Image: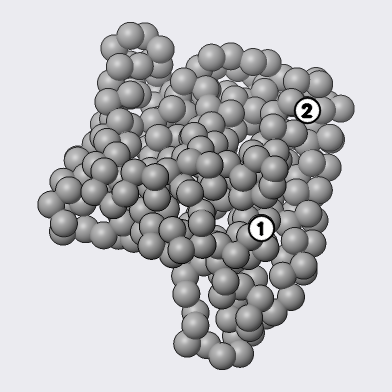
């Protein structure tokens, strides 16, 4: 559930392995790996971690994200939003990628089922909600990204929901702390998805894909993208000063200059949405890791 695969039109006969690699988009997995590690840090600091759950949580979260990436490509292609797919440019058999998505998500759900047996039924809610959001990002009937709600879905899935679900699996309990702690990195992930949509305004308009960026237009979209980047450190400051998260989490403001710099470069035309997206991937992971480390120090 992230940026579309980079164009590889110059490759007339790409290898199958390369096609899968492009659609899996490994760099985008940082958007899920960060919140999972954040949840682990919060769990170690505030609860009794069930060590047997650590590996299933990390692997299951990454499998879910990989499955969502494959499903999004497939349903974009089916709806004409990514016409290069299925023409020998990215992959020649789209249904194989749908099958791959289903296998990845089924594997994630099997790990969740194992954890449910060891912990409790509340994890079922998080697992099913994650699968639903991941698929319905582009799939009918909801098609969240086509209705201008893709960024909200990304924030929830790769922010509070994923962190809280992972915390539940790791400790067998629910708490506000992991959900609140994931808000800053979730905002950065939403910025990543929005930057992708800003980059694709022209082709999305042609295909009838009414993303939030298409609805706002290029100029207002760039302003909103800058606001999302700046919202991350602002949210952290509010949470820390209000007692929502420990004061130690203020060390995460070490990443704030990057948010400010990228936002300013975007607004002054010195950075493209593609460049913003590349930086925001790393920024989101850094924010999540710093938050997790702060909980260990608190």
**x, y percentage for residue 256?**
24, 36
Name the foreground residue: 221 vs 298: 221
What number of labels is visible?
2
Q: Residue furthest bottom?
A: 12
For the residues marked 2 and 1, what is the alpha-carbon distance in whole angstroms? Answer: 25 Å
Residue 262 visible from this viewpoint: no
Q: Residue at x 29, y 12 (%)?
A: 241
Name the foreground residue: 208 vs 64: 208
Mark 2 falls on what kind of element? helix
Q: Residue furthest left?
A: 268
For disc 1, the marked residue is 75
Left or right for 188, reference 233: right
Q: Residue at x 38, y 57 (%)?
A: 201
Residue 124: assigned label: 2
Q: Please, is residue 120 above or below residue 143 in the view? A: above
Q: Residue furthest right?
A: 117
**x, y percentage for residue 171?**
67, 21
Q: Residue at x 32, y 37 (%)?
A: 228
Quadrant of image for the C terminus: top left
Q: Residue at x 51, y 56 (%)?
A: 208
């Amino acid at each position: 559930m992230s940026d579309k695969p980079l164009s590889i039109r110059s490759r007339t006969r790409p290898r199958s392995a390369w096609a899968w690699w492009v659609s899996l988009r490994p760099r985008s997995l940082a958007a899920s790996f960060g919140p999972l590690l954040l949840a682990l840090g919060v769990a170690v600091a505030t609860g009794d971690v069930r060590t047997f759950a650590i590996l299933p949580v990390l692997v299951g979260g990454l499998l879910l994200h990989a499955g969502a990436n494959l499903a999004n490509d497939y349903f974009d292609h089916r709806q004409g939003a990514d016409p290069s797919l299925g023409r020998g440019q990215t992959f020649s058999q789209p249904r194989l990628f749908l099958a791959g998505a289903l296998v990845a998500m089924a594997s994630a759900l099997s790990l969740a089922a194992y954890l449910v047996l060891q912990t409790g039924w509340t994890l079922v809610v998080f697992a099913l909600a994650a699968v639903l959001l991941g698929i319905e990002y582009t799939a009918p009937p909801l098609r969240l990204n086509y209705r201008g709600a893709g960024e909200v879905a990304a924030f929830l899935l790769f922010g509070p929901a994923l962190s809280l679900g992972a915390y539940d699996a790791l400790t067998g309990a629910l708490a506000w702390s992991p959900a609140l702690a994931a808000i800053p990195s979730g905002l950065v992930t939403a910025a990543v998805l929005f930057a992708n949509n800003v980059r694709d305004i022209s082709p999305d308009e042609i295909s009838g894909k009414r993303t939030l960026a298409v609805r706002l237009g290029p100029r207002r979209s760039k302003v909103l993208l800058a606001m999302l980047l700046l919202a991350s450190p602002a949210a952290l400051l509010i949470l820390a000063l209000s007692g929502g998260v420990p004061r130690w989490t203020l060390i995460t403001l070490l990443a704030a200059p990057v948010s400010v710099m990228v936002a300013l470069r975007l607004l002054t035309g010195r950075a493209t949405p593609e460049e913003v997206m590349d930086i925001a991937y790393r920024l989101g992971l850094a924010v999540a890791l710093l938050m997790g480390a702060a909980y260990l120090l608190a």
